[in-house]
Image: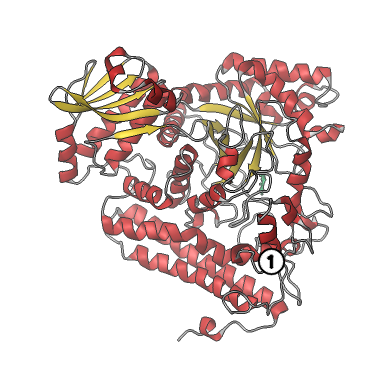
Amino acid sequence: MAEDGSELWLRYEKLPENVASNYQNQIETLAILGQSQTLNIASDELQQAFLGLTGCSLKTDSKFGERSIILSLASNKSVSQFFTKDELRSVGDEGYLLRTIPVGKGSAILIAANTDAGILYGTFELIRLLQTGQPVYALEKIESPKYDLRLLNHWDNLDGTVERGYAGHSIWWNYPKNDEVVLQRYVDYARANASVGINGTVLNNVNASPQVLTDEYIRKFAKVADVLRPYHLKVYMSVNFSSPVVLDGLATADPLNEEVIKWWKQKADDIYGLIPDFGGFLVKANSEGQPGPQDFGRTHADGANMLAAALKPHGGVVMWRAFVYSPSDTDRAKQAYNEFMPFDGQFADNVIIQVKNGPVDFQPREPFSPLFGAMQQTPAMIEFQLTQEYLGFSNHLAYLAPMQKECFESDTWGKGKESTVAKTTDGSLFASEKSAIAAVANIGRDTNWCGHQFAQANWYAYGRLAWNHELALDELAREWVRMTFTLKPEFEQSVVDIMMRSREAVVNYMTPLGLHHLMGWSHHHGPEPWCEVPGAREDWLPSYFHKASEDGIGFDRSETGSKATEQYFSPLKELYNNKQTCPDELLLWFHHLPWDYRMKSGKTLWEELCYHYYAGVEETRLFQQKWDALDGIIDTERFAHVQQKLKIQTTEAIWWRDACLLYFQTFSKMPIPLELERPI
Ligand code: GCW
């Protein structure tokens, strides 16, 4: 067993003796009814897991009996008596039934599905139950995913660097030659994703190089696709809108030009010739300097629909990003909505609009993007960020599932009460051909994949939530801790507690009360609320967002300011508009308030700010204490790694707190409350 984190949560370490022997008594053989590469993978994984966890191997058989685990397509006659047609229909193409069935005088565990993919997902669910020490004698699960397309986006450049990557170089591009190691890495990547239900991956940066569409790179994509395919993981590509001009010298990339249309059609045909199950294109257009249809006086709909038409005959989709803003008088938080709403309903049915969870840019806390709930004629998908561009890189422990849950559960009021972001995107409120969700990956070539052992939890939990956004956060944390570290309750309790508090801690020491975008210029590391860059775009500077001056702090987006609140439905609009009802967590996102403004707590705004910044730092100290107390429970290597990271986190939390408060104090001219600065 490696102790470096390389196995992620798929560590099949021996369980405590009583748990292991319990499983041995209940499970003896593995019956595989059918033949396919995916079934072989499922069976190998289960055997490997069972052996590791119990110390005992499973005998395989083509028939089942008492104490079998049965992997079977539902169409197989010998299992069809164990479920109804309705149940089968309800699990769809990717779901499964996991059920204890009576066999002879005893019982067996049946994993049945309509497809091999469903069996693979069901197998990983059973493995998860075994790994976490759950009882398996009366299983009854009928599962299917909430989103159809569940993707990772890699911001990986072809030279091997990773934009906003903090875990080493790209796992996809520019490897030194060593095929075997690389291929094994891809297999492990595919296993990890299959184990949490992720079924698609974009292999290159949204700031896309046109080169990906050369034969050389299409072949490289195909090679990866061949490895990922049996794990039910499809490959997608980010494309550059100027590709026809750059690669083949066309005079224009105008999406209505015949030559251009033909060019993309041919490219799509070439890709599908090599990758028959290719997923589709992800496009960042007319955003942060990327080319797009607007360069030719055309619209987002013109651009997206042209690409969609090229992919349509092959069943591919276009994920068209709504991350657009330009230096203008309009509040940056309003721009995506303004640009996209006029086209709602004008996109082809295989276009999905990919919208960042918040209206600005992956900040530790933002309100949800007002496009959710508002775009009712065009499918919208959420884009989360797992790589911690704004949450301490791979140095800070920040369990992001609570942030994702906050977004899922936000009520948009788009169709009245309970029109949550989840429901407006998963196909349950607005009809869509395919519902989808994506997250920017935090994965690199580091041995432990994600830079920080705990960043693995974000990959894990994202996949699980994409499968079912209703899963409980602490449950998810608990299962990840058990799979990744140990079943020992004292460890689990402390570590789950740290995880559950961690995101709020980051918000507090970086950007409390709705503040945002206070980070360092360009690299985004550490605080720089004072940042000024001669000639720089105003909407890239922290002062654009915090607007601190002697009269107060915060961005007035209410009706007396930029009126961004108008992009939300009632009664949310009114709630945000009114500083009395606006939740504290978003107060300075929506309001500019004087330093002595009286908060709900009775404190002044300045004092409240100080309390939040100090509380954030205290939390990181608490995390250190809690972790230190666990010394000796897990392997030294991972223990020391986390211990060291937590030290950095505390140091940087202090840096954030002091930098922000001392800078803001130059305007507030108020003292830091004595009980904070000089605690007895
Ligand atoms: O968050 C910003 C990042 C850019 C990124 C961009 C985007 C890939 O700072 O690095 O570019 O968002 O999402 O397109």
Instruction: Pick the residue in front: 541 or 342.
Output: 342
Query: Left of 125 or right of it: where is 374?
Result: right
Vertical arrangement, residue 435 with respect to residue 88, above or below: below
As shown in the figure, which amino acid type bears the numbered disc 1? Pro
Instruction: Pick the residue in front: 458 or 329.
Output: 329
Query: Left of 164 or right of it: where is 18?
Result: left
Tell me residue 304's x, y (percent): 73, 29
Q: Residue placed farthest to the front in the image? A: 416
At x 75% / y 53%, what residue is drawn? 332
Q: Which residue is mark 1?
A: 529
Quadrant in the picture for residue 629? bottom left
Tell me residue 98's x, y (percent): 32, 30
SS for callout 1: loop
At x 58% / y 67%, what residue is drawn? 656
The crowding category of the residue bearing disc 1, from other C-alpha atoms within 10 Å (few below 14, some 14 to 19, many at least 20), is many
Query: Left of 525 or right of it: where is 183?
Result: left
Vertical arrangement, residue 340 with respect to residue 522, above or below: above
Quadrant in the picture for residue 669? bottom right
Q: Is residue 67 visible?
A: no
Vertical arrangement, residue 506 with respect to residue 260, above or below: below
At x 72% / y 56%, what residue is drawn? 565
Tell me residue 82's x, y (percent): 28, 22
Locate the N terminus by quadrant.
top left
Q: Is residue 643 visible?
A: yes
Instruction: Pick the residue in front: 524 or 40.
Output: 40
What's the image's color scheme?
A: secondary structure
Quadrant in the picture for residue 609? bottom right
Q: Residue placed farthest to the left in the image? A: 105
Query: Left of 526 or right of it: where is 501?
Result: left
Instruction: Pick the residue in front: 175 or 480.
Output: 480
